[in-house]
Every structure is written in structure tokens, then in C-alpha cells.
Image (cartoon, grey):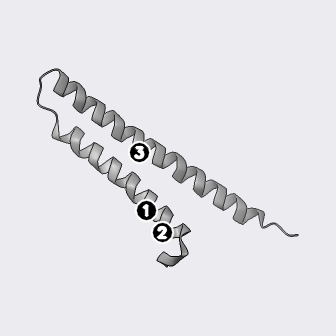
Amino acid sequence: MHVDWSALGEVALVSLIFGVGVAVVFALGVAAMARRAVAIAEKKLPSIVDTSVAGLCFAACLAAVFYGLYLIIPQFH
């Protein structure tokens, strides 16, 4: 049995980078939503930047999930 170690390392590195990347983007979205919630609780107008950042972060996470499903399910190809 022959193992292509460079291909295995490449797959491991890419999955690590994207796995951590999606988690970081989701955490940024949660932090932006928390800043928005604090502003609302303090009876201030929430920043449009926080709302936009949260929406973009969650949309990017959703896109990553759908892309992963596209890669996994053969009927989509």
C-alpha cells in the first residue's frame, strides 16, 4: 500500500485552515451581534456596521456549509 504523504498533508492543511477560518468568521459574527445587543440594551441606536458585519459573517459561514455539501453530495455535480 502506497500513501501519497504530500497529498495527505495538503488535504490536512487545507481542512485545518478552512475549519479554523469558518470558526473564526462565526465568532466575529457573534461578537458583532453581541455589540449590537449591548447597544440596544443601553437604549442606543445599534451601529449599521455591527449589523452588516454580523450578517456578512453568518452569510459566509452558510456559504461554506453549502459549498461543503455541494462537494460531498454527488447528485449536485
Image quarter where the N terminus lies is bottom right
Q: Which residue is identified by label 2?
A: 70
Horizontal side, residue 60 vs residue 47: left or right: right
Q: Amino acid at mark 3?
A: Val
Q: In the image, is residue 22 above or below residue 41?
A: below
Report the residue at 55% width, 67% height from top. 72
Q: Amino acid at mark 1?
A: Phe
Q: Nearer the viewer, mark 3 or mark 2?
A: 2
Q: Which residue is identified by label 1?
A: 66
Report the residue at 34% width, 48% height from top. 58
* Marks 1,3: beta carbons within 8 A: no
Quarter-of-image position of residue 64: bottom left
Mark 1 or mark 3, which has the lower sequence index? 3
Q: CA distance from mark 1 to mark 3?
A: 16 Å
Q: Position of residue 23 (x, y in %)?
A: 47, 44
Q: CA distance from mark 3 to mark 2?
A: 20 Å
Q: Position of residue 45 (x, y in %)?
A: 11, 30
Q: Amino acid at mark 2?
A: Tyr
Q: CA distance from mark 2 to mark 1?
A: 6 Å
Label 3 secondary element? helix
Mark 3 or mark 2, which has the lower sequence index? 3
Label 1 secondary element? helix
Horizontal side, residue 22 vs residue 15: left or right: left
Q: In the image, is residue 22 above or below residue 69?
A: above
* Marks 2,1: beta carbons within 8 A: yes
Q: Which residue is identified by label 3?
A: 25
Q: In the image, is residue 1 above or below residue 51?
A: below
Front residue (pair 10, 56): 56
User: Local crowd at mark 3 within 10 Å, few (<14), some, or many (≥20)?
Assistant: some
Report the residue at 48% width, 69% height from top. 70
Number of the label disc, if any, that sits on residue 38: none
User: Local crowd at mark 2 within 10 Å, few (<14), some, or many (≥20)?
Assistant: few
